[in-house]
Image (cartoon, rainbow, N blue to C red):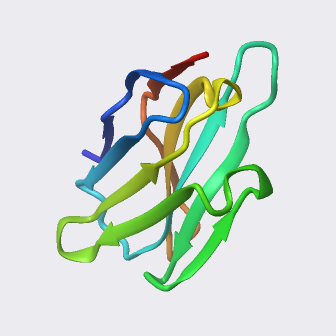
Amino acid sequence: QAQVVESGGGLVQAGGSLRLSCAASGILFRITTMGWYRQAPGKQRELVAALTSGVRTNYADSVKGRFTISRDNAKNTVYLQMNSLKPEDTAVYYCNVLTVNGREYWGQGTQVTVSS
């Protein structure tokens, strides 16, 4: 059974750092893209960062230079290092996994709260 499990969220002061992790398991087809989305209260879910084929990255303009996405292919795990956090980064962060046959999987989400 496919599972996508996030961890690493929490409460941090503005200017601080957090590292999110997402582990995918039980997915039969090759994973092409792993990424992070976020959804703040009253807002639509938005792409934060994605990593395709282990090399091509895509970041939201609002996080460029502050967030870094990386992946451990052997563990099917993707990380999001978040530095210089701002209150506007407060949201539920979701891990997203895409496979070569077009299947999509989502994690349950992890809360990130940045206090001012």
Q: Which quadrant of the structure image shows residue 74?
A: bottom left
Classify 8 as above or below 114.
below
Q: Residue at x 27, y 65 (%)?
A: 76
Q: Which quadrant of the structure image shows residue 59?
A: bottom right
Q: Residue at x 52, y 71 (%)?
A: 51
Which residue is more in the foreground, 104 or 8? Answer: 8
Q: In the image, 88: left or right of 24?
A: right
Q: Which quadrant of the structure image shows residue 6?
A: top left
**Quarter occupied by the C terminus:** top right
**Quarter occupied by the N terminus:** top left
Q: Where is residue 17 in the image (x, y as percent from the top left)?
A: 41, 40
Classify 37 as above or below 74.
above
Q: Position of residue 7 (x, y in %)?
A: 30, 35
Q: Position of residue 43 (x, y in %)?
A: 81, 23
Which residue is more in the foreground, 104 or 15? Answer: 15
Classify 23 as above or below 29.
above
Q: Which residue is drawn at 48% across and 22% down?
A: 13
Q: How many marks?
A: 0
Q: Position of residue 20 (x, y in %)?
A: 36, 43
Q: In the image, 32: left or right of 58?
A: left
